[in-house]
Image (tube, rainbow, N blue to C red):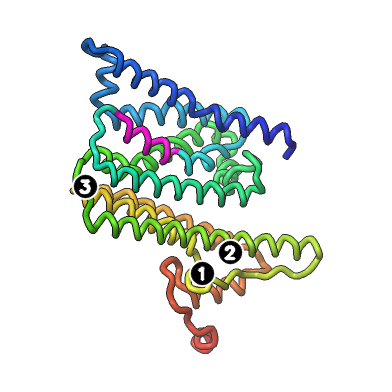
Amino acid sequence: MSRTSNLKNAVLAFLVPLPSVMLYLYFLSHFQINSNPLSPLWSWCFHHPLLLANVFFFLNVNVLFWLIGFIQSSNWMIDLYWTVIPVLLLHYYATHPLAQFDPWRSKIVVVLTWLWSIRLNHSYFRREKWQWGAREDWRFADLRIHYGKHWWWISFFSVYVSQQIFLIGICLPLYVVHSVDKPLSMWDFVAVGICLCGIAIAYFADTQLHHFMTRNTKLKELGKPMVPNLDRGLWQYSRHPNYFGEQLWWWGLGVFAWNLGHGWTFMGPLINSMCLAYVTLLVEQRMLKQEYRAEAYRLYQKTTSVWVPWFRSSALAVKDKDT
């Protein structure tokens, strides 16, 4: 990827959220300055914060990102903004005129969400060798090939509209935290512990995976046999510890909302876990298609827990059972 293309994509990535940001800031300034009854438009924005968030998402992400993806023939931007949109939603909910919340809980959730976002952004750019838009998610690339000439319109629904339902839904605890004013309790600290564990596990798992893949790349360049499978560190106890850590984060966020009387928001992390179950299936099928690691990975599947870290089964016992 050329430096010019990298710079263009970086500038583009910083500019794309500006329509929503500028319109929302204009709404806030209009609301604060105008003491007269609000116009129908601003009144609607005031009374329907969740619907307004969906309007911003639909126009600024679904439509704009889709047009950019269509022009560039790559849907890379939604992968990057997966780590940014929750932060934007968080500050939107916290600054909306109808917001009411315990200031300490809000500060805690703000810090946690930024930690999560920074961690995930770091992992993303490290994986992409610090380039902007060098490639799109391999699952989107596979779908592009599968749907061929129809992908241009199917992508609008499968990549963007689906993400709106998913991201708005999974971030509902951020809305609840900023719509209920209730003093801190023990459960808030439980939620903090779960969230921090999730962030830490995902970080170390992704770092171990990055080192493994970097080493294999060097071995391949030297013409030496690559290591077929990562089964050290956290990966010794779970086949997908990074997914496990990510799930912990969202379930911990749900505990904040549950503590405020909105346990129904657990539907978000539940759906996320179901999606990650499907992604896990796709990843493992992909691993088994690579001849140099297929046999080692089949044994890894038999001896190692899928998500929740646990002690490994004996490889010898598995072999004896198979024979």
Q: Amino acid at mark 2?
A: Gln
Q: Give 7 or 51, whichever is nearer the viewer.
A: 7
Membership of 291 in magenta stretch: no
* Residue that numbered label 3 is attached to: 262
**Residue 142 in the image, given as x and y percentages of width and height:** 58, 47
**Quadrant where the N terminus lies?**
top right
State how many labels appear: 3
Question: Neighbour class for label 2 at 10 Å: few (<14), some, many (≥20)?
Answer: some
Mark 3 or mark 1: whose residue is earlier in sequence: 1
Residue 170 visible? The answer is: no
Badge number at residue 181: none
Name the residue tied to disc 2.
208
Q: Please tell me which residue lies in front, 44 or 281.
A: 44
Please report contact status of discs 2 and 1: CB closer than 8 Å, yes or no. yes
Q: Quadrant of the C terminus?
A: bottom right
**Whole-percent x and y of residue 241?**
48, 64
Q: Residue at x 72, y 60 (%)?
A: 217
The residue under the point 21% across, 47% down is: 262
Q: Identify the element where label 1 is drawn.
A: helix
Disc 1 designates what residue?
234
Q: Looking at the rendering, which quadrant does residue 186 occupy? A: bottom left
Q: Look at 23% across and 51% down and name the residue there.
A: 184
Question: Residue 223: where, in percent of width, then height?
Answer: 81, 65
> For the magenta stretch, what is the residue range?
85-96
Q: Residue at x 65, y 70 (%)?
A: 228
Instruction: Say left or right for 61 vs 128.
Output: left
**Labels 2 and 3: the sequence-earlier one:** 2
The first of marks 2 and 1 along the sequence is: 2
**In the shown orientation, is residue 94 left or right of residue 19?**
left
Secondary structure mostly seen in the magenta stretch: helix
Q: Secondary structure at mark 3?
A: loop
